[in-house]
Image: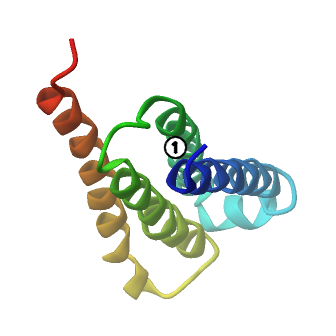
Amino acid sequence: MNASTRLIVLAAGLLGFTGVALGAFGAHALKETLTARGRVSTWQTAVLYHLIHAVALLALAGWAGNWTNARWIGVCWMLGVVFFSGSLYWLSLGGPKFLGPITPLGGLAFLTGWLLVAWNALSSTKA
């Protein structure tokens, strides 16, 4: 396993762990707080995108070893989790409203990563 792949697998493991932990924390320890703020669905959206991209990173590590931009895909998805899910977590807990515009930046990072995946499929010279 090369260093780039190892970093992607490490990130997948950490994001998977934190995604499950935050999902459980929201469902149990924060249930009353999130319900009172009307933010249960916001928290769930954050967890969903967090976990989807943890799994996507793991798949990327196993599949894209020869892609020159696999590292950039991973960076985009990690930034997406930080900005998209992170801002939603914080907003759910009553964080400052200026975080609202940060959420779409995370969405753009997710989209950029997925476009890079598509780019690899289109530019691949292997049969």
User: Residue 67 at x, y = what percent?
Assistant: 32, 40
> Which SS class for mark 1?
helix
21 lies above or below 86: above
Q: Quadrant of the N terminus?
A: top right
User: Residue 21 at x, y = what percent?
Assistant: 79, 54
Point 51% across, 61% down: residue: 85
28 lies above or below 102: above
**How many marks are shown on the rendered structure?**
1
**Observer-nearest residue: 50 or 123?**
123
User: Residue 33 at x, y = what percent?
Assistant: 75, 67
Point 31% across, 60% down: residue: 109
Q: Residues within 10 Å of mark 1 (few under 14, many from 20)?
A: many
Residue tagged 1: 57
Q: Amino acid at mark 1?
A: Leu
50 relative to 83 in the view: left or right:
right
Which residue is the extreme one toward the front? 2
**Observer-nearest residue: 75 or 127?**
127
User: Residue 95 at x, y = what percent?
Assistant: 56, 83
Which residue is the extreme one toward the top? 127
**Observer-nearest residue: 9 or 110?**
9
Point 73% across, 50% down: residue: 23
96 lies above or below 57: below
Q: Quadrant of the C terminus?
A: top left
**Observer-nearest residue: 34 or 16?**
16
61 lies above or below 108: above
